[in-house]
Amino acid sequence: MEELFNKSVMVHPLLTNDPTRMQGQIGLISEIDYEKGEAQVRFPYEVVGIYPISALLSLLPKEMILASIQEKLTELEPKEIRILLDIYRLQQDGRPGAIEEALRWAIAYQNVGKHSTISLEDFIERGLSENIDRQQSRGR
């Protein structure tokens, strides 16, 4: 999954054992060791940390966020729907700064995060891709 190189991820804000002390911070994946289940993450100011992939959060693919909004329309508060749509819009933008902002919004609201984030471990195990259309065309 070379598409994970330079993917924006957030260190889980509640991670208790973090020698790099970057809980809640956003960085870019620079390497993944699938055998060990670890990822090397680069943060600003040349800080680098190695984390279990289960300790890193990623945004769900934008198409899945949109589907979640449609499925949960009657259960979500109007403010949560607006935030999820903003996250979707930021993912459409695709620039690293926009993705970082989307991650911050997702984490700021628990119910929004539940519908827009996933652990990197689950992202990999489920074979997700940033572009669902591209993923589906591979399977044809």
Image (spheres, rainbow, N blue to C red):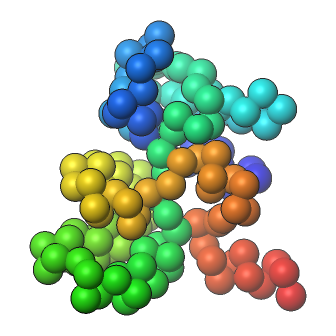
The total number of labels drawn is 0
Q: Where residue 32 appears, x then y in whole percent?
A: 71, 35
Residue at horizontal 44%, vertical 34%? Answer: 11
| Left or right: where 108 falls relative to 123 | left
Q: In the image as oriented, which residue stretches furthest toward the left?
A: 79
| Left or right: where 5 falls relative to 84 | right
Residue at horizontal 47%, vertical 10%? Answer: 19
Above/below status of 23 relative to 122: above
Q: Where residue 28 appears, x then y in whole percent?
A: 51, 38
Location of the C terminus by quadrant is bottom right
Q: Where residue 3 appears, x then y in whole percent?
A: 68, 55
Q: Is residue 102 visible?
A: no
| Left or right: where 83 falls relative to 7 | left
Above/below status of 136 relative to 38: below
Q: Nearer the viewer, residue 8 or 14?
A: 14
Q: In the image as oriented, which residue stretches furthest toward the front?
A: 75
Residue at horizontal 54%, vertical 20%? Answer: 49
Q: Where residue 80 appears, x then y in whole percent?
A: 20, 71
- The quarter holding residue 73 reads bottom left
Residue at horizontal 63%, vertical 77%? Answer: 132
Q: In the image as oriented, which residue stretches furthest toward the top?
A: 19
Above/below status of 74 relative to 40: below
Q: Is residue 133 visible?
A: yes
